[in-house]
Image: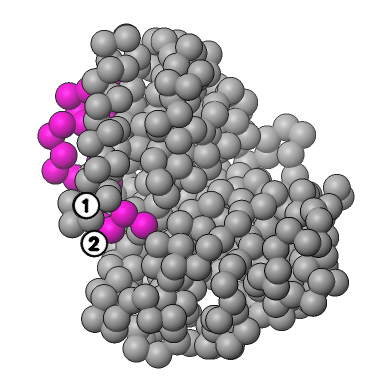
């Protein structure tokens, strides 16, 4: 296996920056994880300082837009599940105009790849005006948000040239997971042994991703022509995987100009089911952590829905955990995700969805690096 800490991605002919950046994710994740979690026994700066200002707070607010908000939705569940701290995820553009009486003295974390996004910067400044503790997770350590927040947690994704976020998104997930893990230890909701196990599994993610990328890429290149004439797509995920469904749908919209929506899996029958047909495929996240009873329960509900949808003639493309023999029975195409914990699976699941968006763009003759009407950083509201 190629060393994921190497600065050179696998030997591949990258025809677009987006594809190169998808393949750079093992290296970006390895660098980010090493920055924030080199030793599971000691919180690293700036996480140590972060715990000083937000460790005792009873609530956090995450404000972000676009892909960064989807990372925030995943971070919400990471923080709540591991550390037991309630989290509200806000659209940055809405938080800016929210009442000052809605929450009392939360910590406020903003997420932005550029660190210059206008509505997210406005949300940061609104929080500062309320004298709240602020944290910024950005991909640019010298950005305005990084400079103005009380604590800066930069990702180490490196320069991202394509407009659709890929490696900046997965490294945001890694930073949020590290934060949630250290907060859990600080608050005593996770003992040292469990923290060490989770840290070890996090460090394994870059290598797992490096190994899986070539096979995903080949399968999705073959799959894309079969889906290219679809009218719309529904992306479905339960729990933390709902955030990844949302992000997968956004990637398809902005890269391939196709209508796509992300929903919690259980919401399909509450309206969206009317759209299901061979022309409107379901992209279903059906991974499972067999050691987690809650994950197993969610998985059983996803399987049940897949059975029902197949009887209705649905076209299903599924993401399943390696070794799963049930999901392939109810899907026309199945992409296997290396086994890991439920929360860490997010960093793997999103990558085949990025590849799907890229391959669909190419199949439709679209340059995914520069989608129409979009810019890398929205610097005006």
Quarter of the image containing the N terminus? Answer: bottom left
Say whether residue 360 is visible. Answer: yes
Q: Nearer the viewer, residue 165 or 63?
A: 63
Residue drawn at (65%, 77%) of the image: 152
Residue 184 is inside the magenta segment: no
Q: Quadrant of residue 186?
A: bottom left
Res. 315 image quadrant: top left
Near-viewer residue (20 or 187): 187
Question: Residue at image x 34%, y 27%?
Answer: 317
Distance between the Cα atoms at labels 2 and 1? 32 Å
**Residue 139, horizontal then vertical, whole percent:** 63, 65
Q: Position of residue 341 (x, y in %)?
A: 28, 58
Q: Which residue is mark 2?
A: 1
Q: Which region shows up in magenta?
A: 322-343
Give the secondary structure at mark 1: helix
Is residue 6 visible in the rendered structure shown here?
Answer: no
Nearer the observer, 100 or 39: 100
Percent coordinates x, y for residue 62 in the rendering: 63, 60
Please say whether residue 328 is one of the residues in the magenta stretch: yes
For marks 2 and 1, the one nearer the N-term is 2
Depicted 332 relative to depicted 76: above or below:
above
**How far from the left and from the top, in percent, is residue 143?**
75, 70
Q: Is residue 1 left or right of residue 355?
A: left
Residue behind mark 1: 293
């Amino acid at each position: 296996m190629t060393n994921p800490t190497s600065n050179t991605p696998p030997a591949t002919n990258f025809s677009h920056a987006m594809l190169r950046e998808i393949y750079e994710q093992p290296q970006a994740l390895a660098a980010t994880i090493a920055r924030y979690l080199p030793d599971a026994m000691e919180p690293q700066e700036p996480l140590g300082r972060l715990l000083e200002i937000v460790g005792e707070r009873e609530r956090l607010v995450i404000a972000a837009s676009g892909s960064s908000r989807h990372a925030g939705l995943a971070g919400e569940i990471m923080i709540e599940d591991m550390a037991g701290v309630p989290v509200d995820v806000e659209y940055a553009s809405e938080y800016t105009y929210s009442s000052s009486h809605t929450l009392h003295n939360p910590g406020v974390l903003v997420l932005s790849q550029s660190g210059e996004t206008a509505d997210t910067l406005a949300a940061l400044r609104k929080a500062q005006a309320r004298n709240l503790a602020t944290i910024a997770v950005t991909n640019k350590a010298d950005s305005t948000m990084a400079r103005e927040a009380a604590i800066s947690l930069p990702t180490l994704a490196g320069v991202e040239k394509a407009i659709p976020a890929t490696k900046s998104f997965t490294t945001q997930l890694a930073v949020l997971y590290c934060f949630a893990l250290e907060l859990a230890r600080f608050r005593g909701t996770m003992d040292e042994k469990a923290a060490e196990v989770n840290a070890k599994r996090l460090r394994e993610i870059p290598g797992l991703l490096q190994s899986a990328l070539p096979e995903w890429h080949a399968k999705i290149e073959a799959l894309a022509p079969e889906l290219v004439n679809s009218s719309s797509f529904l992306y479905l995920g339960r729990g933390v995987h709902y955030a990844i469904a949302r992000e997968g749908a956004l990637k398809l919209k902005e890269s391939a100009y196709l209508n796509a929506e992300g929903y919690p899996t259980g919401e399909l029958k509450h309206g969206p089911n009317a759209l299901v047909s061979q022309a409107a495929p379901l992209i279903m996240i059906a991974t499972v952590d067999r050691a987690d009873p809650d994950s197993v329960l969610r998985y059983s509900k996803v399987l049940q829905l897949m059975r029902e949808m197949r009887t209705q003639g649905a076209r299903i493309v599924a993401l399943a955990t390696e070794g799963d023999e049930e999901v392939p029975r109810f899907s026309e195409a199945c992409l296997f995700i290396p086994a890991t914990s439920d929360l860490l699976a997010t960093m793997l699941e999103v990558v085949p969805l990025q590849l799907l968006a890229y391959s669909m763009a190419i199949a439709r003759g679209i340059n995914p690096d520069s989608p129409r009407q979009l810019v890398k950083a929205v610097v005006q509201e």
